[in-house]
Amino acid sequence: MTKIENARQQRNIVVTVAILAAVALAFYLFSFIQNWR
Amino acid sequence: MATAHHDEHPSGLGRWLMTTNHKDIGTLYLLFALVMFFVGGAMALVIRAELFQPGLQVVDPHFFNQMTTVHALVMVFGVVMPAFTGLANWLIPMMIGAPDMALPRLNNWSFWLLPPAATLLIISLFVPGGGPAGGWTLYPPLSVQTGMGMDFTILSVHLLGMSSILGSINIIATILNMRAPGMTFMKMPMFVWTWLITAYLLLAVMPVLAGAVTMLLTDRHFGTHFFDAAGGGDPVLFQHVFWFFGHPEVYILILPAFGVFSQIIPTFARKPLFGYDTMVYATASIAFLSFIVWAHHMYTVGMPLAGELFFMYATMLIAVPTGVKVFNWIATMWRGSMTFETPMLYAVAGVFTFTMGGLTGLMLSIAPADFQYHDTYFVVAHFHYTIFGGSVLALMGAAYYWLPKWTGHMYNERLGKWQFWLTMIGFHLAFFPQHFLGLAGMPRRIPDYALQFTEFNQWSTVGAFVMGFAQLLLLYIVVQTIRSGRKAGAKVWEGAEGLEWTLSSPPPYHSFAVAPDIK
């Protein structure tokens, strides 16, 4: 794997993790919001 | 990554505490699950010992209720989920031609959250007021009113959830970004596919469970009334939030098992998996449907008729993709050159037993009929046929199938077959009579029962102890295989396909530092 390919893979992993963490947080908050009335 | 150091092979306690190696972490998960299997199994035997005859003889009712609750929590969160995560850790990088997981340090943390979580759960049994005793579903108002053991449980569930969320992020990031060149999505082994879909389920629903138990905690200690009718809340809302997690959760327990069956059956039928594409779509369909069926667990709370009908029909729909999978496994075996080594016995038995559990699930999905079955032993029989008969049998099959790959030694085939048959006889003896008990009206989660239920309960208890004994044999076989046994070659099984079988047995500490060629 070249240096550029490696850097691209690292960047893709970081982006994937950021999106997935945001989804998990959204579901956590969602479980409260539907109760808050 | 590509710059892995080949000579690095730490040893001692530090190796296990600080490891970032997917194989080591996989081993840790599997050993943890095995230990918890015996902890949860011992609790099951306490339950069955008490139920051997009517009246109260072995434990007091409050402790009995703690046993039913903690047995379930241990088996779901401490055994089946960690065991499948262990398989994922060991196998996914090797199956997709990656050198390791995408986030190895996070991987270490995901595992090491588990022992403290399990410790909290177990010591909850020894604090004033005892452990959680209202069932694994932790329904309020009971879970708001019980002692500090519930706080231990809530913290434990938070830690277990964190571990699962981090693990699933890692698995998705690995599968999306670390596949070897040429390993397209539709070339991935089914086990990898089922885990990818399972990881998405985990990511969506574990935070919801965390939300539910956080609200329980604030209701208990911080003056909120989420689930308190007297304060304007609603205990039924907890059930909705819980089962929004809980139903996908049961698919989290079974989808990786489907992946295991899809690896083992083609190997021993010596044919490629029939209907690979449809398997992928069926798995995704089951995952999608799992989000819109949760209220079938609570038909009896008093829902509008339209709600009951929606959840009933949606639940019945799940039988379609599940049927596709079962037919595909049968078609894979059709006219295959089959042999029945222990992993294949477990896979065939698992498909059969899970299908029995699936059919009783279809019976339970019928709302008017469920009013009769609800909270009876019929439900207990149903979910043990799916979780033990599906998930745990798949795990045992997987252990026999990949143990030679992991350890470099063959297990003892004769003992493996004994262990299989003892487990199966014990299992069916323990759980088949429970269908009749439930249909006759015996409620679940009770330490005592009416006289007419005695005989079936006695069969059930004998079966449970046979099953328990068979697991001691499993332990012996695993230890024997690790310590000795015939040397296993790279391709342990004649019909096995996949990248993990191109590596030596045991595989090198760092594998696929250079990406393999994918045909």
Image: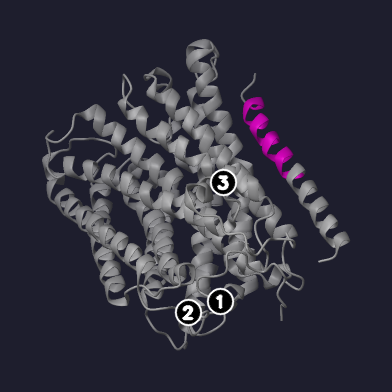
Q: Amino acid at mark 1?
A: Trp
Residue B18, numbered label: 3
Q: Amino acid at mark 3?
A: Met
Residue denoted by label 1: B501
Q: Amino acid at mark 2?
A: Val
Residue B492, numbered label: 2
Chain of the residue under the numbered disc 3 shown in the image: B
Element under disc 2: loop
- Observer-nearest of B390 and B446: B390
Q: Return the x and y of residue B92 as percentages of the image width and height.
A: 60, 62
Q: Earlier in the sequence, mark 3 or mark 2?
A: 3
Q: Quadrant of residue B150?
A: top left
Mark 3 vs mark 1, CA separation in Å: 28 Å
Is circle 3 on the same chain as circle 2? yes
Question: Bounds of the magenta span?
Answer: A19-34
| Contact check, label 3 and label 2, Cβ < 8 Å | no
Q: Residue at x 58, y 75 (%)?
A: B503
Q: Return the x and y of residue B405 as percentages of the image width and height.
A: 49, 71
Q: Return the x and y of residue B411 as percentages of the image width and height.
A: 36, 72
Element under disc 3: helix
Chain of the residue under the numbered disc 1 shown in the image: B
Q: Residues within 10 Å of mark 3 (few under 14, many from 20)?
A: some
